[in-house]
Amino acid sequence: MDKKKSLWILAASAAVTLAYNALKPVKSNVKVVEPFDVDRYLGKWYEIARLDFKWEKGLSLVTAEYNKNMDGSIAVNNQGFHKEKDKWKQSVGKAKFIESPTKGALKVSFFGPFYSGYNVVKIDANYQHALIFGENLDYMWLLSREKSIPEDVKLDFLDYAKESGYTIDNLVWTKQA
C-alpha cells in the first residue's frame, strides 16, 4: 500500500470516528447513583441477569471485573463461558466517567474510540448488588458480588427496571454454576 493511500485511509478513519462521536454522544437520561463510590464498586461482579445481545449470546458463568487505571479510568474485563463452543470468551475495555467520579454515569468502550453508556442506577448500601442500564432500553444488567441475589433485592431491582420502561420478561438469567 502506498503512503498516499495509507494517509487517506487514516484521515477517513479519523473523520468517521469524529462523526460517530458527534452524532451519537453518550449521555444519560436516567437518574444514576449519587454519591457513587468507585473504590467500593471496583472488583469482581457476577452477572445475575441481562438483556441479551450479540456479544453475550449463549454465555454462562459471566463475570465483570473492574479495576482503576493510573489515569483514573476503569479497566473492564468481562468474560463468560460458551458451552456449545466449549470455550471462554473475554472482552477487555475501558470505562470513563461522563461527569464526575461521584456519579454512577459512565461510558465504556471495547472497540477503540466507540463508547456506550453504562449507568449504575441502583446499588445497595454495601455495594453487593447493582442494577445497570445501558444508553437505551436494549441494555440492562443485574449484578451481584455473589453467584446469586436475595429475592427481595431482585424484586426491587426488577420493579425499578419495569417502571423505567425495560421489558423484564426478556431478561436472560445467567447460569453461574
Image (cartoon, grey):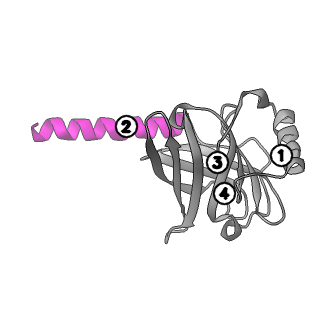
Rate crowding at label 3 as few (under 14), some (14 to 19) or many (20 or more) other CA atoms within 10 Å. Answer: some
Report the quarter where the N terminus lies: top left
Give the residue at mark 2: 15
Comes first in the chain, label 4 or label 1: 4
Q: CA distance from mark 3 to mark 1?
A: 16 Å
Q: CA distance from mark 2 to mark 1?
A: 44 Å
Nearest the viewer among 174 and 107 is 174
Above or below residue 172? Residue 105 is: below
Q: CA distance from mark 4 to mark 1?
A: 29 Å
Q: Are marks 4 and 2 in contact (CB under 8 Å)?
A: no
- Image position, residue 172 (x, y; %): 68, 34
Would residue 130 be found to the left or right of residue 151 on screen?
A: left
Comes first in the chain, label 2 or label 1: 2
Rendered residue at 69%/54% (across/down): 147
Kind of residue at disc 3: Gln
Rendered residue at 51%/36% (across/down): 55
Give the residue at mark 3: 176
Mark 2 vs mark 1, foreground winner is 1
Comes first in the chain, label 3 or label 4: 4
Would residue 125 be found to the left or right of residue 59 on screen?
A: right
Mark 2 vs mark 3, foreground winner is 3
Give the residue at mark 1: 154
Q: Secondary structure at mark 1?
A: helix
Q: CA distance from mark 2 to mark 3?
A: 42 Å
Q: Secondary structure at mark 2?
A: helix
Q: Secondary structure at mark 3?
A: loop
Q: Is residue 17 magenta?
A: yes
Kind of residue at disc 1: Lys
Mark 3 vs mark 1, foreground winner is 3
Kind of residue at disc 4: Glu
Rate crowding at label 1 as few (under 14), some (14 to 19) or many (20 or more) other CA atoms within 10 Å. Answer: some
